[in-house]
Image (tube, rainbow, N blue to C red):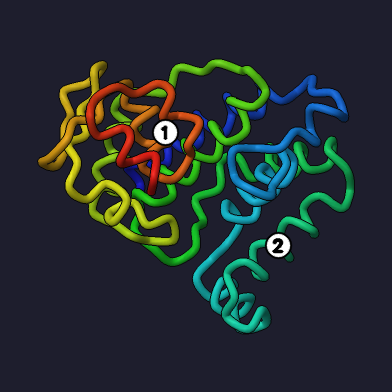
Amino acid sequence: MADIWPLVHAERAALAADLADLSAAEWATPSLDAGWSVQDVLAHMTATALMTPPKFFGKMLASGFSFTKFAQKEIDKGTAGGPAQTLAEFRAAETSTKAPPGPKDSWLGETVIHAEDIRRPLGIRHDYPVGAVVQTLDFYKGSNLIVGTKTRVAGLTLKAVDADWSHGTGPLVEGPALSLLLAATGRKVALDDLTGDGVATLRTR
């Protein structure tokens, strides 16, 4: 997993810097991840950064193998001390190389996608490395892990306008690689950045 960690660590550091001066109202802003606030998503990212396979399976067992319950318990723990503490704990985990079980590219995706779940509602722009976004797209295009991307984009052609990347056959969905990634993983706000005959189909999914 060594190849992804410099990217992950750099993106964690950039996100922490962007969140340094948020107001209480901004911390409570709904994220792109339905039901979670900005603070909730950051707490989730910290929990993921400190997770190991044995801890993951133990906590899932304690949650009745409900990922929703498991994730909420971790968020409740990570937000209990208030936003400043949540941010401090995220910074402390910035260089962690721990991860739950799963494909390595999913943890790069976790970092990029959840960072944008936080930034977009706050109006914070960030230039993610295109290579990292494409690497994450390449993983999710063939995976239904948790968010069901493989099924969501089936029968469509996805084409990035800012990278040499495309996938699939069928009606076209075209736009920035980051917006393709967000739309493919269920973030409907990103559909407004995309064009092509396939956008309407993707919107229904």
| Image mark count | 2
On the picture, is 44 further left or further right than 151? right
Between disc 1 and disc 2, the foreground one is 2
Question: How far from the left and from the top, in percent, is residue 147?
Answer: 43, 55
Residue 83 position (above or below residue 20) = below
Task: Provide the secondary structure element on which disc 1 rests.
Answer: helix
On the picture, is 57 further left or further right than 78? left
Question: How far from the left and from the top, in percent, is residue 20?
Answer: 75, 23
Residue drawn at (51%, 35%) of the image: 9
On the picture, is 12 further left or further right than 89? left
* Location of mark 1 (residue): 7
Nearest the eye: 105 or 141: 141
* Location of mark 2 (residue): 72
Residue drawn at (79%, 19%) of the image: 21
Nearest the eye: 107 or 158: 158
- The quadrant in which residue 101 appears is bottom left
Residue 175 position (above or below residue 111) = above
Residue 30 position (above or below residue 102) = above
Q: Which amino acid type corresponds to the residue marked 2 in the rendered image?
A: Gln
Task: Provide the secondary structure element on which disc 2 rests.
Answer: helix
On the picture, is 80 further left or further right than 151? right
Q: CA distance from mark 1 to mark 2?
A: 27 Å
